[in-house]
Amino acid sequence: MVPSASPQMKTGGNSMEASASSQMYAVNPLQTEHVRLRAMEPRDVDLLYRWENDPEVWKVSDTMVPFSKFTLQEFIKTSTMDIYASRQLRLMVEDWKGNTVGAVDVFDFEPFHRRAGIGILIAKEYRENGYAEEAVRCVCQYLFSVFQLHQVYCNVMEDNEISLKLFQHVGFVLTGRKKDWMRGKNGFLDVLILQLIHENEK
């Protein structure tokens, strides 16, 4: 159960609050000190409509056409499908005030090979608050602990320095490059492959 009061941010709060928070995070793999991950709800359709139809997002999501609200409503309905059947999962990112600040995508889930790809979007108005890093750490821990994955990976365009630094800071290692993979305004761009191997299985 989510506490009625938000945990203290990086500074402040007493030791009893910190202890209770630590125990709570240990029990629920889908929450951290500042964010929690949750399933999509019908109320998210307007947010998804805004995000998915932002041309800035198209550059990194390999999308070229707008999405209708109907399409997104159907996507939310089918999101309840088992990840083992759909091979994908989208989780919404909330702060402890209840604001939906972004989303995390798990894709190409391969239970036999025990791997999956991940991607993240944080809404413009909530960036530079550390939400992306905490959400990435959280979803990786969730995939390692609950689904027993061996590794997770991501694809980052070579000119996306912010995302590259984010994933490397979390512990992802640059292992490959897809040459001329994405077409940009000024020509083709490489896509970098980064992997995170579960520490206990190295």
Image (cartoon, grey):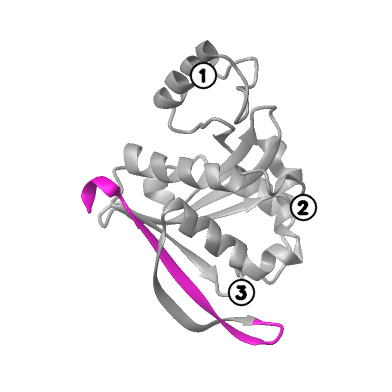
> Bounds of the magenta span?
184-202
Give the Cα separation between the discs numbered 2 and 3.
24 Å
- Kindly tell me whether residue 109 is visible in this rendering: no
Of the numbered discs in the image, which one, if any, rests on residue 18? 1
| Residue appearing at x 60%, y 70% in the figure | 62
List x then y, in percent, for residue 77. Answer: 59, 42
List x then y, in percent, for residue 59. Answer: 66, 70
Q: Earlier in the sequence, mark 3 or mark 1?
A: 1
Dot 2 falls on a residue whose secondary structure is helix
- The reply to whether callout 2 and callout 3 are in contact (CB within 8 Å) is no
| Residue appearing at x 57%, y 19% in the figure | 2
Report the residue marked by disc 2. Answer: 50
Residue at the bottom extreme of this rendering: 187
Residue at the top extreme of this rendering: 16
> In what quadrant of the picture does the C terminus appear?
bottom left
Q: Which quadrant of the figure has residue 146?
A: top left
Name the amino acid, label 1: Ala
**Residue 66 falls inside the magenta stretch:** no
- Marks 1 and 2: which is nearer the front? 1
Name the amino acid, label 2: Arg
